[in-house]
Image (spheres, grey):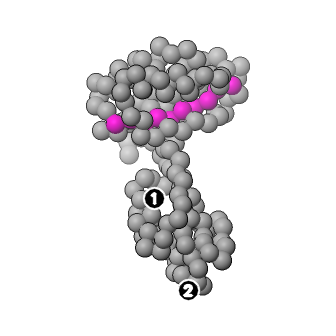
Amino acid sequence: MMNTFVVHVEDKPGVLNRIASLFRRRAFNIESLTVGHTERPGISRMTIVVETDADEAQRIEANLYKLVNVLHVQNVTAVPTVHRDLALIKVSAKSESTRTHLIQLVNIFRAHVVDVTPESMVVEITGTEEKIDGLLEVLRPFGVTEMVRTGRVAISRGAACVANHHLDGDYLAEQDEISITQ
C-alpha cells in the first residue's frame, strides 16, 4: 500500500540527506519525494510516498521523529487530502494537423500547451498520477520525446492543518483534527 507522509523540517543543509539515508538504511524505496518552502520562513515541507504496510509506516514515522531538524511527521494516507503531481511532456508535432489534434487531446485532459516549436509541443498537466498516466498513454503514439514529472504534493482538506508553527519557526502542537468526510 502507498503511504504518504508529510514531514515538516527546519530548512537547513543536510536534512534531505539524513531523511533519504533513513529510507536507504531500512531498504525502503521512495516512490515520490517533493520538498518546498512553507508559509513559515525557515520551515520546509516534504511529501514522501513509500510503498509499505501499516506496521512499517508506523516505524517510519517514529524513526523520522528521531532525526535532527524534523519538527512534525504525519502519515496522511487515511486523511482526506488534495494531492497532485505535475508533468511536462514533450511530444513530436511536425505538422499543423498533428498540432491541432494534440491540442484537442490536451484540452480533454484539462492540460495546457506551454511551448510550441516547428518540431514539438510541450504539454503541462497537473492532477493525480492516474490522470497524468492517462494523458501519457494517449500521447505516446505521437512520439513522446522527453518527460519530467514531479512527485506528489498533498494538503489536508478543510480547515484542519497538518501542523501549525510560530512565526519564528518554533514548533507548536498540532491543531485539533477536524473530522472531514470525503
Q: Residue 46 occupies which quadrant of the picture?
A: top right
Q: Position of residue 144 (x, y in %)?
A: 49, 66
Question: Which mark is drawn over residue 76?
Answer: none
In the figure, is residue 174 to the left or right of 131?
A: right
Q: Amino acid at mark 1?
A: Ile
User: Residue 113 location, x and y as percent?
Assistant: 61, 68
User: Residue 44 magenta-drawn?
Assistant: yes
- Relative depth, front residue between 148 and 180: 148
Residue that badge 1 annotates:
132
Q: Residue at x 49, y 27 (%)?
A: 20
Which structural element holds mark 1? helix
Q: Is residue 146 visible?
A: yes
Pointer 1 or 2: first along the chain: 2
Q: In the rendering, at what x and y percent does residue 174 appear?
A: 52, 22
As shown in the figure, which amino acid type bears the numbered disc 2?
Answer: Ser
- The residue wearing badge 2 is 97
User: Residue, x 62% and y 75% (percent of image)?
Assistant: 119
Image quarter of the N terminus: top left
From the viewer's perspective, is residue 70 above or below residue 158?
A: above
Q: Which residue is at the front of the view, 32 or 70? A: 32
Look at the picture and state if 69 lies above or below 82.
above
Residues in magenta, as a range: 42-51
